[in-house]
Image (tube, rainbow, N blue to C red):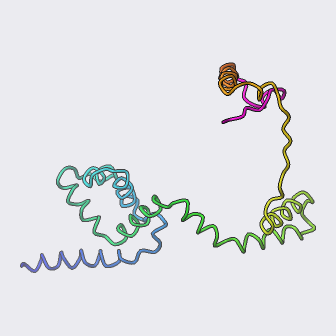
Amino acid sequence: MRPEDIKCKEIVLNVNSGLDKNPDPSKPIINNKWEKFLLNKLKGMNTGEGYTAAGYKSVGKVALAAGTRLLTFVVIKRRMEYLQRAETTTVTDIRDLSRLFTAEAVQLQARAMRDESLAMSVRLVAAEKLIERGHGKAPQTITLEPSAYESLPIAGQRALLAAIELVGLGAGDDGDGPAPVHH
C-alpha cells in the first residue's frame, strides 16, 4: 500500500468519525443531499437513482457506489431506521403514547375548570370532560317513533335511500325527511 493511499483512508475515517454522533434521528439530517437521498430510498428508488435524484451529479455505477457508501454512514442508518419505524407506527402504538399524557391532560382540564378568568363555557366543557373521564358518558335516551320509512320492507327502504342519494338529499339535509336506518 502506498503512503498516499493510507493518508486518503485516514481522511475518510476522520470525516466518518463525526457521523456516528447523530444528534436526533427524528430531525432531518443537516446535509440536505443526504436527507433527500435517504427519502428517495424510502420512496422505493434504487440506490443509484436515489443518489442522483438527491442532487449529486454522478450517474450509473458511480452513483450506485457512492449511494452504497452513504448507506454505511451511521447518521443515515439511524435516520432511516427512525423513519421506517415511524411509517409502521400502529394505532396501538399511538394509543400507548397518548396514554402517557393522560394524567397531564386531566390536570390541564382541572386547571381550566377552576380558572375563573376563562369563559364559563370553556370551564363547563372541561368539567364535563373530567366527569366523563371518571364516570363514563351519561346514558342518552333516544325515542324513536315509527314512521312511514320504517314501515317499509327492507327492499323499499333501500330503494328510498337510493332515490334520496340520486337527487342529492342526504339525511338531515332538509330537516323533514326520516333519518335512514341501515340494516
User: Residues in magenta?
Assistant: 168-183
Q: Position of residue 121 (x, y in %)?
A: 90, 57
The one nearer the camera, 183 or 163, is 183
- In the rendered structure, the answer to whether residue 154 lies left or right of residue 51 reads right
The one nearer the camera, 47 or 143, is 143
Q: Is residue 43 magenta?
A: no
Image quadrant assignment for residue 42: bottom left
Q: Is residue 176 magenta?
A: yes
Q: Residue at x 24, y 62 (%)?
A: 68
The vertical placement of 52 against 131, above or below, is above
Q: Main secondary structure of the magenta part?
A: loop
Image quadrant assignment for residue 137: bottom right
- In the rendered structure, the answer to whether residue 129 lies left or right of residue 101 reads right
Quadrant location of the C terminus in the rendered image: top right
Q: Residue at x 83, y 71 (%)?
A: 110
**Total numbered labels placed on residues in the image:** 0
- In the rendered structure, the answer to whether residue 125 lies left or right of residue 40 reads right
Q: Residue at x 73, y 32 (%)?
A: 180
The one nearer the camera, 71 or 19, is 71
Q: Position of residue 11 (x, y in %)?
A: 23, 76
- In the rendered structure, the answer to whether residue 100 lies left or right of residue 172 reads left
Image quadrant assignment for residue 62: bottom left
Q: Position of residue 3 (x, y in %)?
A: 10, 80
Quadrant location of the N terminus in the rendered image: bottom left
